[in-house]
Image (tube, grey):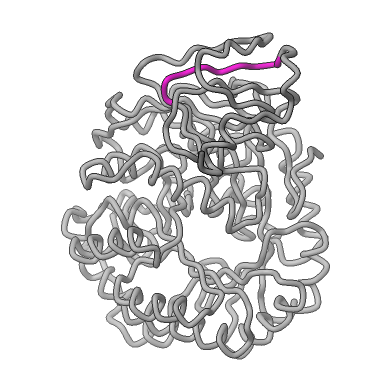
Amino acid sequence: MSQAEESQSTSLDPTGEHYDLVIRGERVLTSAGIQPREVGVRGGVIVAMQPLGNNLNGVEVVELGADETLIPGLVDTHVHVNEPGRTEWEGFASATRAAAAGGVTTILDMPLNSIPPTVSVEALNIKREAAKGQTHVDVGFWGGAVPGNTADLRPLHDAGVFGFKCFLLHSGVDEFPPLDADELEKDMRELSNFDSVMIVHAEDSRAIDRAPQPEGDDYGKFLASRPRGAENLAIAEVIERARWTGGRAHILHLSSSDALAMLRTAKNDGLKITVETCPHYLTLTAEEIPHGATQFKCCPPIREAGNRELLWQGLEDGTIDFIVSDHSPSTLDLKDLENGDFAVAWGGVASLQLGLSLIWTEARQRGLSLETVVSWMSERPAQFAGLTGKGRIAPGYDADFSVFAADDAYVVDVDKLYHKNHLTPYHGKALAGRVRKTYLHGEVVDFETPRGRLLRRGMTDAE
């Protein structure tokens, strides 16, 4: 028996006593693959995993349907909630409802576009206070690295942020200014003192300054204004600064497939580099974006079909580590829907509720398994963030689950999403795979009673 198989027939509590919750099904996604299992939960934690038929007893017993798979709750480490300060864009209540509806049970909130940005312990405390009592899933926080706050990085780390985000060009909001390359290196050296990670929006401002300016409703002109070269230059800079400092670096929302070769080389050289991409880069193509459809605008941009295919290859060969949403909504007026001008519209895609269905729809057409998709969207981002109790269905892990009907098809209706602002590029898109139920710490998310916890790095206890 393999170690993985052995772990699935063990229990942290083999006393035979009752559990708070038992879920039984022919299809439970375990570390040994999809298996017939019974999962016993007590105190919000998985304490028993037994072969189906052992008849574990529970206060509540759930029998999965024949078309349902129990999967671990997804972990989305790239979400812009925007509360406080821009709560009309998205708030903790709406964002976490959307997350739960999409099978996401843990999110990490970006340090912008809230006001104040999370660049000091004081700002982090304001953010946490705003979130308290509102969250329907577990929520952790990134800190921000901006010019002049190097002295704030260690205190923020000690206060529990999961790492630090920086931009290498204007972030889109003036209160979160970018680092130059030398400031990036200085802060990476500081972070290496306590083994934190710098997560980087990697686009080069010089390349973008010299590119054609976006104008009007032509997506092609916007795409030309954010060339692949801008990403490639910035990623090369991050790789070298990681090489010089020995620090941990993470490339956010990779859209340029050109960069895959140098990222692959950096990883082979032993650099501490990780990479994410997003559903919009894997499911949409520039060729299909209509004139004036600013709901598709994001930075870096959605690129051509050939680029998309290479990103999928990068996922399959492990150069790209995982998939997250980069959910970055705004109010409808900021999307300039009336004029459809890509030059002035806010750049961000709203997709937090849809990610699993989006990726599963595309992946199954490519012959990829549900196990692989869930690894990219749950286990790997959890490991990256150091969320040791998340991302797997196994004894000792949090009882965060989704009941997923992989063959259940539906058409996206933007008015049925929990996102605060009802705009997404996926409206009207036919998708496969529906989340029928989500559990957080062994309790069903009812979308009315906020049971989410505020997480700190290195611990998952409630606040």
Is the residue 62 above or below the residue 210 in the image?
A: above
Residue 408, position as x, y percentages in the image: 30, 24
Residue in the foreground of this view, choosing between 155 and 94: 155
Q: In which quarter of the view is residue 433 placed? A: top left
Residue 317 horizontal/vertical position (percent): 34, 63
Predominant secondary structure in magenta? Answer: strand
Quadrant in which the C terminus is drawn: top right
x 32%, y 82%: residue: 229
Image location of residue 158, percent across then percent down = 82, 63
* Residue occupying the far front of the picture: 1
Task: Please tell me which residue lies in front, 421 or 249.
Answer: 249
Q: Is residue 26 one of those drawn in magenta?
A: yes
Is residue 439 left or right of 402 when viewed as pictured?
right
Q: Residue at x 40, y 81 (%)?
A: 265
The residue drawn where x is 51% and y is 88% is 240
In the image: residue 302, left or right of residue 239: left
- Residue stretch rendered in magenta on the structure: 19-27
